Amino acid sequence: MKQQQLEILSNEPLAAGIWRMVLLGDTSDSAPGRFAELRLPGEFYLRRPISVCDAREDRLTLVYKTVGRGTRRMTELVPGQEIEALTGLGNGFDLSRARDGAVLAGGGVGCAPLFLLARRLREAGCPVTAVLGFNRADEIFYEEEFRALGVRVEIATLDGSRGTKGFVTDAMPGIAGSLYVCGPQPMMKAVWRRARAAGQYSLEERMGCGFGVCMGCSIQTAGGSRRVCADGPVFAGEELLWND
Amino acid sequence: MERLKTTLCGIPLDNPVIPASGTFGYGEEFAALYDINCLGTFSFKGTTAQPRFGNPTPRIAECTAGLLNAVGLQNPGVEAVIGEILPRMKTYFHKPVMANVSGFSVEDYAGACEKLGREPQIGWLEINISCPNVHGGGMSFGTDPKAAAEVVAAVRRVTEKPLIVKLTPNVTDITEIARSCEAAGADGISLINTLLGMRIDPLRRRPVLQRTMGGFSGPAVFPVALRMVWQVYEAVKIPVVGIGGIASAEDVIEMMLAGACAVEIGSENLVRPTVCKDIIDGLPAVMDRLGIAKLEDIIGGAHGWEKM
C-alpha cells in the first residue's frame, strides 16, 4: 500500500454509464486485479475503491461505472486536478498458473481489471480468450483494446444487440487453460457452475478502509473468514461459498 | 518529546494518541506504513471469549463526515489472540498495549479479561460495555448502571491490570453510568463508543446496512463526544480517555481541555492511515501557537472557566 497524490490526466466517458480516468503517479504497485482507494473532494468521508484497468510507466488507468453519488462526483473531476489515493491494494490475480492459455470472463465494468491481466498474459506469450458480457451494445468498452493485444474476444449482450444474445456463459468456448472472472455476483456464479474447475474470481464488497483493518468487507469462505479488500479481492473458486 | 508525555492509570505514555479499537486491527497493516512505536499505545480489535464472524454484509455505510458500521465484533477469539497474535505483536510493537474486550455475559467478560490480563504486554484492559451491534449483548450492560457495575466488579476480581470501561453514548445520563463503573472498581473511563444510526437506500427502499442499524462515528460526532467527556470528567475522579471524531492535533487539545488525559482516534485511521503519526508530529507546533508548554498541564483546563 502506498499513499500518494495522483494528477488527473484525463477523465471521460467510454460507454453508457462507464468512465475512464487516467492518472499520473507511481504505478509500480498496481498489479492486475489490485485496486486503488480514491479520496474524493467534497462531502465524501470514505474513499472509493476502483480496480486497476491498466498501469503503464507512470500512468494509471481506472475504469469506473457511475452508480452512486461518489462515482457521479468522480465524473466531474477535470484534468490537472490532484486526487489523493491509496494504491497497490488487494492481492491481485495470480498469473503464474496460466501457461498454456487463459480464459477471461468479464461482466460489465468487471471487464476493466481483466485488461491489464490480458496484457500481462500476452506479454508472457500466453494465448488469451476474453469473453465480455454487457447488458446492451452501448455499454461495451475496450473490445478493440483487447483485440489489439492479440486476444480472442467474444461478446455477449443480454438484449442481443451485439454478439451472442445472453450471458457470458452463452458465449464461452470450452475452458482451456486458466480461468479468470470478474463481474456481478450472479454472473460469476453462472461461470462457476459452468466451469466448476478452479478459476480465480475477483469479488466486490462495500468497503470501509480498503486495507484490512475495519472488517467491513468480510466474507465467509471454505477456509474461514476473509477480508475482500486485503485477503482478496481475488479468490480461488473452490474457496468461495456459492450457496448451491 | 517530554512535553507530549501523559499518564494513563499509572502507566506513562510518550504522548496521548491511541488508535481506537476496531479501526487499527492489531497494528500490522499500519506498521507497514509507519513505525507504530511512535504511538502512546493502541487499543486492539475487540476480543470476545469465542471467535466471531460478525454480522452479514453490507456492514458499512457512509454518512456526511463519518460512517456507520455494523461489523458485529468480528475477531478470532481470546485463545487465538493470545496464542497467535500477541506473540507476533511484540515483534513490531514494543510498548504496553490496550486489550479491548467485549462479551455477552458477565462470565464472558471475566473469562477473557482474566486470560488477557496475564499477558505481559497487555498494559490496560478496556472493556467495551457499549457495542450497539449485537443482540442481547453489549447494549444492555452499557445502558444500565447496575449491569455495568456487575461487569466491572466481576472483571475487577480477576485482574490487577488497569481497567478502563468504554461507555456507550446511547443513554440518557452518561454520568450515572460513569459513576457506577467508578464505584465498582474501574480505574478509568473511555468514551464515547458509536452513536446508534441508520441509512436508507432510496432506490431499493431498504436500509443500507444488512442489520438495519449501526454505530455512527467520524468527525461529525466530535461535539457530542466532547460534551460527554466534559460531563464525565466532572462526575468521576478516575482518568478519562476521550474518543469520538478526533481528526487533528487541535481536536486532541480540545479533548484534553475538556478533561481527557489521553485520546483515542478511530474512524480517521480508516480514511487517513497515517493520521495518528501526523497528529503526534503536528502537536508541538499547535501547542506553541496556543502557548501550551506541556500537554499534562491542560487536562481539564477549561473547567471552571466561569471563574477565570
Image: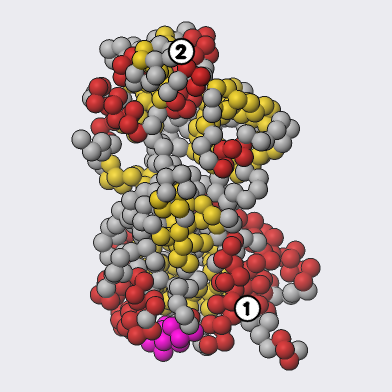
Where is mark 1, residue-wise?
Answer: B258
Q: Is residue B176 magenta?
A: yes
Residue shown at the point (66%, 77%) measured from the top left: B257
Tell me where residue B286 appears, x and y as whole percent.
74, 65
Residue shown at the point (37%, 81%) measured from the top left: B144
Q: How is the image coloured?
A: secondary structure
Among all residues in the image, which is located at the extreme bottom? Answer: B307
The image shows residue B254, relative to residue B199, as above or below, that is below
| Element class at badge 1 | helix
| Image quarter hosting the C terminus of chain B | bottom right
Residue shown at the point (40%, 50%) measured from the top left: B206
Tell me where residue B129 appears, x and y as whole percent.
38, 73
The image shows residue B127, relative to residue B266, as above or below, that is below
Q: Is residue B147 visible?
A: yes
The magenta segment is: B175-186
Is B277 in front, or is A191? A191
Asked whether the residues under marks 1 and 2 belong to the same chain, the reply is no
From the viewer's perspective, is B65 left or right of A203? right
Q: Chain of mark 2?
A: A
The nearer-to-camera label among 1 and 2 is 1
Tell me where residue B274 appears, x and y as whole percent.
59, 52
| Image quarter hosting the N terminus of chain B | bottom right
The Cα–Cα distance between marks 1 and 2, rounded to whole angstroms, is 62 Å
Q: Is residue B26 magenta?
A: no
From the viewer's perspective, is B258 left or right of B118? right
Please state which amino acid type lies under the numbered disc 2.
Answer: Arg
| Element class at badge 2 | helix
Please state which amino acid type lies under the numbered disc 1.
Answer: Ala
Where is mark 2, residue-wise?
Answer: A122
Q: Is residue B117 visible?
A: no
